[in-house]
Amino acid sequence: MKQVLKCVIAFIFVLTLIPFSNQAKAASNLLISEYVEGSSYNKAIEIYNPGNTAVDLSSYSLVSFTNGADRTTGTVTELKLSGTIEAKSTYVIANKSASEAVLSKAQMTTGNAVMNFNGDDTLVLFQNYDATTKNGEVQDAVGQIGVDPGTNFGTDVSTLDMTLVRTNDLLTPDTNIEDAYHPEKQFIALPKDTFDQLGRFDGGVVAPPAELAKDQYQVKVLRVVDGDTIKISPAIMGSDTIRFVNIDTAETYHLTSYDESLIKTDLNQNQKYFGELAKKALNEKLTPGMDITVKVNKDHVTDDYGRVLGQVIRTSDNVNVNLNMVKEGFASTYFIWPVMSMEDYNMFQSAVKAAQDAGLGMWNKSNPQLELPFEFRARYDGKGLLRYVGNSDTKVFYDPQNFAQVPVDKRIFFSKEEAIAQGYKLAAGNGEGEITVESAKAMDIDAARKAGKGTNAIVTGTVTHIDGYNIYIQDKTGGIVVRSKTVKPNIGDVIEATGETGEYFGLYQIESEEIKVTGQSNITPEKKTLSSIGESEEAELITINDVTVKSVNEHSEYTVEDKSGHTFMIKAKSGIEVGKTYHAITGVVTFSYDNYKLLPTEIVEKEIVKETPKTVSGIAFLDKNHNGKYDRPDLVLKNVKVSIYKDNQLVEEVVTDEFGVYNALLLNGNYTLKFEVPNGLVETFENNADENVDSDISDGKVDVVINNQDVQNISAGYTKPVGKMKRK
């Protein structure tokens, strides 16, 4: 009995040493299966348990590292979880102010700051989280701690304004929260405010095809941002922001409030006052939940800030709100070339003329708006007036600072090159005086760069990169940017561009809408040994080698260092990670914000070494004297097939020639050569002599290792089945 008791105690002791493997496995396999970053408070996180055992969430926390926070600095907030996730089930956490479509699917709703995340915040699912050390067992994460990406991680699959969902082939958790984050490795993207997948895991969900632009959209108003900007739902082409086209209202961003006593004398106070009036007027015209139609130019739906450019039509009474704001004096007209509809242009310009003549709103002579919005932005933001202004009646255009010489109802804003291309003449007395347009001269790119600003040139080069309006071209003498708003060639096109040379934020360029494709070509990037990137490389396609990424700033500009300690700046949205070394980065040299930098076109992590195949050779012979080696009086055998296998896969077949010789070209690796037995013969002895040429096969095959050298004399000997050589 005592012996039995001892056995029972020993068994229990052993059990205490064995981990509860099923429970541990389930805990270690929890995933963030859906990430909802929607409009307003529509924020939700779905956690999935792919295991076969329910998981108690009491030891789990969802932690937010806000705006680049890490374990030592910045704002880090913990949300302790509770409840249970059943096997193969989900658990949804939502912001308590989210829409009912989200809340109805949530197991936990909260006002905790964790669930007020934006696209630039990092979320980590921890088990056994320690709030003091900000550490624990990482289960999964969205983002990278210590890095503020600006607005979002990722591009096509982005942590901003999207619903991100896992599929069956994207079930690997991200447990390294300090390496570079690429959301496309975890998720597919669904449109903003998509909630139909929330609360259930469907590993086969498919991302929708890219949205095709339409002429108009039916949406609802969410809220008014300012006098010419609103938020809407659902999003249009991925954006929930509408910037009213054809109009411009006073700004509000520069002050939190205005002083009534200063609005007639202080430019900033005056701008704020009229901005608030315009915002109030728009709020009265568009209320939350109102149905509207947004009319867009489907060839140019969004602006450089990602906002939809549109005219807003109230569904209830078909009122054009853009036009209505102009008619009532809350907005000025604002047309930047190219004007998409001259019918709209004339309608809006007639409205602003009538409002101005009647002294309505901003045109009130006793209390006028002291600066037009574009004029205010140029002064307050410090960028100055950049666009020339043309008179649509007289076809005369003026220097930017002389915009007031053109009546508001006749203004179209141009670059100088655009104005000239449309037949406008520069007004007398504007800077350089009345312009005499000289015929453009054909010149190579180096000559165009040296000719200086204001030169009317024709340049020809191969397109190496396109970045927004900037087309980078290159010939044998150098590179230059062709800036065009309407023409979009392809990489490799040879284009001829006619226009005026100038600078845009320090980047030398030719402004041109007169571009034609004359052929196709390839530019081989020059591999340069540089101590720095400068003006001599501007707009050229170059390659820098063997660089290590040292840091990245909030503008996605990476500082890299080569083996000699020289540093360069790389502007990249993705594909580069801090701490990694890259064999080569190829790109075009650009200039912005006082720095030359490389816009990558190709990133190579490791050097690609092309391996030279090695020769395997030998003979097949008839061993007449039965000694296992090729000697007199032996004969060679032709047309013997040799089949070559690698990892049990046939990779090549060869046959012996009239001299009994076979040759095969093979890369490094382990191979098996199988020889076809000639009719009426059997194998002779294997490795029966020290000579180079003897029979190497056993049961018709031989193993060969290729390691950077040719392998010779791998041969096969056969004999007639007589005497002791006879095989059964």
Image (cartoon, grey):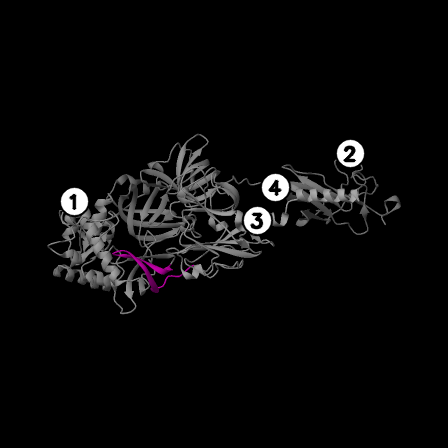
The residue at which mark 3 appears reads as 27
Tag 1: amino acid: Gly
Q: Nearer the viewer, residue 399 or 635?
A: 399
Q: Is residue 482 left or right of residue 695?
A: left
Left or right, 527 with respect to 341, comes to: right
The stretch of residues the image draws in magenta is 210-236
Residue under pointer 1:
431
* Image side of residue 222 versus residue 110, left or right: left
Residue flagged by tag 2: what amino acid is it? Asp
Q: Secondary structure at mark 1?
A: loop
The answer to which of marks 4 and 3 sits earlier in the sequence is: 3
Q: Residue at x 19, y 52 (%)?
A: 273
Disc with the residue nearer the chain's start (1 vs 2): 1
Is residue 400 visible from the viewing direction of this image? no
42 in magenta: no
Q: Are marks 1 and 3 in contact (CB under 8 Å)?
A: no
Mark closest to the chain's N terminus, 4 or 1: 1
* Measured Cα–Cα span from mark 1 to mark 3: 73 Å
Q: Secondary structure at mark 4?
A: loop
Magenta: main secondary structure: strand
Rate crowding at label 3 as few (under 14), some (14 to 19) or many (20 or more) other CA atoms within 10 Å: many
